[in-house]
Amino acid sequence: PIPMEPPRIHLLDQAVVNRIAAGEVVQRPVSAVKELIENSLDADSTSISVVVKDGGLKLIQVSDDGHGIPYDDLPILCERHTTSKLSKFEDLQSIKSMGFRGEALASMTYVGHVTVTTITKGQLHGYRATYRDGIMEHEPKACAAVKGTQIMIENLFYNMSARRKTLQNSADDYPKIVDLICRFAIHHSSVSFSCRKHGAARPDVHSVVTSSRLDAIRSVYGVSVARNLIKIDASDSDPSSSVFSMDGFISNSNYIAKKTIMVLFINDRLVECGALKRAIEIVYTATLPKASKPFIYMSIKLPTEHVDVNIHPTKREVSLLNQEIIIEKIQSAIELKLRSSNESRTFDEQM
Ligand code: ADP
Ligand code: MG
């Protein structure tokens, strides 16, 4: 056989690079909604409402009453790596905002059509601008606006036909979006959230502002969940093992469900932690006689330098220092609570 020339290496077009990267940050409609809500929370909003059409493929619209975006920043708003939240790499250690990389909005403009309407404090009118591939398409137009920012993403993945097809073939993202908003709503109970389908008269989620976490859970997950919850907390302040504090609500032995619901916030970021979830399920199976899958809302606070927030393109996972020790401590706190609540229940039944 004739020896083959090795394929030559060339630099990809920036547009191709950007679209590939964008597809990782915005994997599906629900990931776009998460980024937009996090931006609204970072902007100190007290009210966030979401409208979705066709599972988010036709339209995602997130409106907030936050601080808005200055007119002068609109031209670079959707460029890659433009952010108001991070300056130096070292700042990542202490970052409190949920965003930091300036990639979310840029990504959306590479895989969808983005329109931003915003007004800042003291202005008489707002501005509207549209974006494609990171670039503002024309000068911002003056328009009427109420407080805050509204971001609209249309035709998500219009230029990624494989992604669009797989999404169209499976169940749409609307239930995932509703689920996401319920989670945010119970943690950020001082912010009112709503979510509805485009054209629907009634929202599917509508949370009211409350100072009671249990009330917040009741308002989004219903009475049947809220009445079967136990308050839980745990903490450790020994720097040689782990430093953390945790509080939340977990279901008791009367709660019955086929699937675990685990709502986990670490330093106010909505994240997933498979290891912790499994560890908790094990405690439930081992402790409760007719073990059901639990409902768990948990907020864990750690020193910011113990959390690496930058390990996943969607920021869905974080890595923790001393994760095993923290998990063990949480397991024993839950076991203790479940045992004592189960005993008092058995006692009640005997009376
Ligand atoms: P990041 O959140 O990582 O900074 P984004 O691409 O999500 O990056 O947003 C870029 C910037 O746009 C933010 O840093 C913020 O200044 C501004 N921004 C985005 N959404 C909003 C919003 N809803 N309200 C006010 N400012 C916003
Ligand atoms: Mg962001």
Image (tube, grey):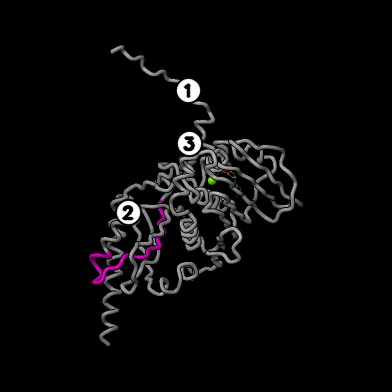
Q: How many marks?
A: 3
Give the mark nearer the N terminus: 2 vs 1. Answer: 1
Closer to us: 126 or 158? 158
The answer to whether the beta carbon of the residue marked 1 is less than 8 Å from any atom of ligand 1 is no
Q: Horizontal and vertical percent for residue 313?
A: 44, 41
Q: What residue type is labelled 3?
A: Ala
User: Which mark's residue is nearer the viewer, 2 or 1?
Assistant: 1
Q: In 3D space, how far apart are the residues under numbered discs 3 and 2 (Cα atoms)?
A: 41 Å
Q: In which quarter of the image is ligand 1?
A: top right
Region in magenta: 284-302
Closer to us: 61 or 238? 61
- Residue 310 placement: quadrant: top left
Q: Which amino acid does label 1 sit on?
A: Leu
Instruction: Please give the residue where the numbered disc 3 appears in the rendered image.
Output: 21
Instruction: Please give the residue where the numbered disc 2 appears in the rendered image.
Output: 238
- Residue 348 placement: quadrant: bottom left
Closer to us: 328 or 77? 77
Is residue 131 rendered to the left or right of residue 339? right
Residue at image position (52%, 68%) is: 211
Residue at image position (60%, 39%) is: 78
Residue at image position (61%, 38%) is: 132
**Secondary structure state at the residue bearing disc 3:** helix
Q: Horizontal and vertical percent for residue 204?
A: 53, 64
Is residue 236 rendered to the left or right of residue 36? left
Q: Horizontal and vertical percent for residue 323?
A: 32, 50
Instruction: Please give the residue where the numbered disc 1 appears in the rendered image.
Output: 11
Query: In the displayed structure, would residue 119 be above or below residue 213?
Result: above
- Residue 247 placement: quadrant: bottom left
User: Which mark's residue is nearer the viewer, 3 or 2?
Assistant: 3
